[in-house]
Image (cartoon, rainbow, N blue to C red):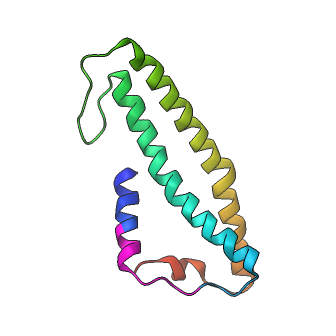
Amino acid sequence: MLAGIFLRIILRLRSPIPERFPGPKPLQLLESLSHRAFYVLMLLLPASGIAYNYCSGLEIPILGWKKTQLEEEDGEKAQKAMTWHRQLGQITEYGWVPFHLLTLAYHSARGRNVIKRIAPF
């Protein structure tokens, strides 16, 4: 996921920013905050999973890194990382995803093609 979000950021920086859909200022502010929150979530979620694996002495997938000399505080760090990972996952699952499904329905009901607008191609 972390590689995917970096790819998304690169594509986003290289593609033009489409014009906003018309709407009231509070809705546009919510849109901006929501997109920024998406990038923060998509960076922190895999980072917390990587931190958990590393502090637990597990191998980090794809990278192959593994902490061989575990210390006493590593267990606490691993548990904190897993707590963050679960909380961020719940925020994503129960907050961000439903919110975006609702906004997709809102824009679709007004005849706006959101998917075409956000696709980098």
Residue 21 seen in the figure? yes
Q: Which residues are magenta?
A: 10-19
Residue toward you, 69 or 116: 69
Residue 14 vs residue 110: left or right?
A: left
State whether residue 40 is above or below residue 20: above
Residue at the location (38% across, 74% down)?
13
* Residue 16: in magenta span: yes
Q: Nearer the viewer, residue 113 or 92?
A: 92
The quarter of the picture where residue 54 lies is top left
Q: Quadrant of residue 35?
A: bottom right
Looking at this view, name the residue that lies furthest to the top.
72
Percent across and percent down for residue 98 are 69, 58
> Residue 47 at what x, y percent from top left?
42, 42
Residue at figure coordinates x 52%, y 82% from the top left:
116
Is 6 part of what is drawn in magenta? no
Q: Residue at x 43, y 17 (%)?
A: 75
Is residue 104 in sight in this rendering?
no
Seen at 31% across and 16% down, the residue is 70
Where does residue 33 sit, x and y in percent of width and height? 62, 65
